[in-house]
Structures are given as structure tokens and as C-alpha cells.
Amino acid sequence: MSKGLIRNIGIIVSGDLESPFCDGDAVLIVDGKIAAVGREKELDAAGADTIIDAMGTTLIPGLIDSHIHPVFGDFTPRQRTVDFLDSELNGGVTTMISAGEVHTPGRPRDIVGLKALAIAAQRAYANFRPSGAKIMAGAPVPEPGMEEQDFADLARAGVTLIGEIGLGGVRTPDLGAPMVKWAKKHGMMVTIHTGGPSLPGSSAIDAAAVIEIDPHIVGHINGGTTSMSKTDIDKLVRGTTLAIEIVHCGNPLTALYAIEAAMDAGAVPRVIIGNDAPSGTGVVPLGILRTLCLLTACTSLPPEQAVALAAGNTAKLYKLNRGLIGLGREADLVLCDAPSGSVGKDAIAALKAGDIPGISMVMTDGVVRTLRSRNTPPAARAAKLEKGSVGGLLGGH
Ligand SMILES: [Zn+2]
């Protein structure tokens, strides 16, 4: 049995939109899961092999990025960058969800080939966890000619995601709607590209097409990178119950428009946050934190609720046992503080002030993966590893 204790926590942000704070100053972890949240003196930490002094900083759930474009390993051909997944983990993101392995050089578009690619990506990332990060991949982009049997084959092989509809040859409701029905019937989560095309030759996808195609998630409602209109955003936020994704590599003006529409319509529980990187915009290790900063600093959204958008909201949508600080949840956790020099006094106040918090510890499954982040600005107060060691790569190249 492994046992870990995080003590001397200043603030515990739960990741749950409805109840965004937990009482207590300590979290006990047993065998990679959260076993107790409360006061240190009330917890049985005897025999703990890992002890972390949070130094009064803020504990948040490991963040979930709902929109990445991985290929294989920790390399992206799109920007010829290695270690971009490890780099994002250093930005507090412990789970990353593929919206399609679209940057695979020579990506096959024939049906057998695209199914094979999806199955290979699902398998590879199930085995490969850079710095302990959890990469959900194997997200085939539908092409014309796919039949129900193809979705059944994919599901039976372990594929649970459908990548952005619209990045392939399926861009219209007549082709897309039946495929989405088949994917849903076989238990897969479906996202769709919206707004202007990201690739030359493809066409814009507007609200009417999204409503007819009926995916689970309105991918990058603020554009990837070119946004749909505010009128169309209103139609999807106010007129549907679809999940609404806001991404970093989109349009900041309509990101703010979408979150304000969601607040006005009581739709914030449906909002999730993605990076949409690697992409033409680049590799953005702090993309999720930057988006949380934008949404809370420029609107009335409380910072602890902003955290929930990239944690509990996404976890609930994808039925993941993480993204929330509570009993029995996977211990994917981040300690952060105001960055040195911020007008904010803690991580939450810094976010509200538009400053990116400084991260000083990231853990997955109860194992410390990194202490001071190599990407965030330095935390004013940094967690200390009093006992134990830092674990690393799982799976290997
Ligand atoms: Zn897209």
C-alpha cells in the first residue's frame, strides 16, 4: 500500500462548479486515490511514504484539456516539437483528450486506414504516459463512406472518441448526422469543428449544421481559429443542451461572449476548456491556465468556478474519476500560488487579477511528477517534498 499526505494547504479548490471549495488543510492519498480531505490532525497519516508541505498554497485538481492534437509519443510534427505533453503537464494539465490525430504525416483518409490509425493511437497512448500524464487518444476523423459497422468495429477495438467532424470529408448534416447516431449508439463521445475552416479547402460549420449533426460537444465555439458569429453562439448556448468548448487557440472576444452567454443562460455546467494545440498557433503549455485567466479576469466568473470548467465539468462529461477533489477520486492534483510579484495574494486572487499562478507540484495517481514547474512563473510560495521522491515517465518510448 502506498500512502501520501499533502499538509499545510491554504485553499482547496474542489473542481466542482456547484461546491467549489473543500474544507480542510490536508489531503490523504492511499494507493493513488484520495482517501480523506480535512484537517491534518484528524487524518491518519501514519506510515506515509510521501509527505508534501504545501506551504499555505492552493490545491486544485489536475486540469483536463478537452482538445489536443497528438500524433505519437511526446512529439508533434505540426510544430516539430518534442516534450509538448510533458510541457503541458508543467502547466497543471494532467489529462489531455484528443480531438483527432490530424497532424499524422500522410494521415490515411481511406476507411481501413483511418480506423487503423485511431486504434493504434488509442493503444499507444494507453501505454505511454509522459511524466504520468493521462492522454486519451484514438479519435478518428470521419470520412464519407463510413457505415455503422465501422463505428461498431472501432468501439469493439476500444476507441471511445470521435475526432472533430469537419476536419475530414464529412462536413454536412446529410453525411454527418447518421454517423453521429452510429457513434453514439456504440458509446463514443463526438466533437465537431465549428466556425471557419482551419485547413484550406474545408468550409465553415455554423450553428444550424451543428444542431442537425447533433454531436456531444460544440468544439471550440470561439473558433479554431476563426469563430462563428455571436448569433450562432447564442443559438448553441441558449437553444441547445450540448457541451460548449472554449479554447485557447481561438478568438478571445467570442470566448468572453460565450462564457457571458453561458452565465446568463445558466449553462456554465456545460462549458469545458481546451487548448487546441498543437496547431498552427503553436504549442501552448500554459494554454489552459491562460484561458482560465481570461475568462475570470475579464468577466464576473469567480476564479474557483473557472477552475471547475477545466476539471469537474469535463470529468463529468467524459465520466472520468478525476478532475474533482473528493473521496475515491484519482489523486491527480496541483499545488499553486500567486506568482512572485502578483497583486494577487494567492492563486485564486492571481487568476482573478489576470496573472497565471505559479505551480510548485503536479501529481498523478498520488505520484509526484514535478515540483517547481518549468513553465509557469515562479510561485511566491513553493511546496516542499518532505518525504518521498519524484516519479517520471510511464511506458517509455
Ligand atoms: Zn477544429
Image (cartoon, rainbow, N blue to C red):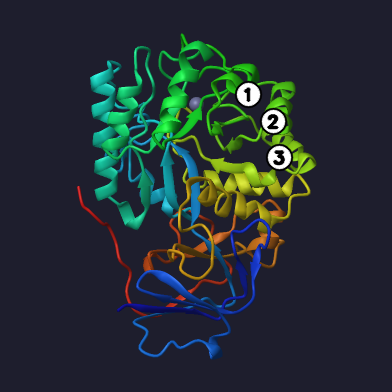
Q: Earlier in the sequence, mark 2 or mark 1?
A: 1
Q: Earlier in the sequence, mark 1 or mark 3?
A: 1
Q: Amino acid at mark 1?
A: Ser
Residue 299 in the image: state x and y as whole percent: 76, 45
Is mark 1 in CB contact (under 8 Å) with mark 3?
no
Rounded to the nearest angstrom, the CA distance separating label 2 from label 1 is: 7 Å
User: Quick one: label 1, few (<14), some, or many (20+) residues within 10 Å?
Assistant: many
Secondary structure at badge 2 equals helix
* The one of 8 and 98 positioned closer to us in this rendering: 98
User: Is 337 left or right of 143, judged from the image as shown?
Assistant: right
Provide the residue designation for mark 1. Answer: 227
Provide the residue designation for mark 2. Answer: 254
Q: Residue at x 35, y 30 (%)?
A: 101
* The one of 53 and 148 positioned closer to us in this rendering: 148
Query: Which quadrant of the rendered structure holds the N terminus?
Result: bottom left
Q: Residue at x 65, y 35 (%)?
A: 241
Total marks shown come to 3
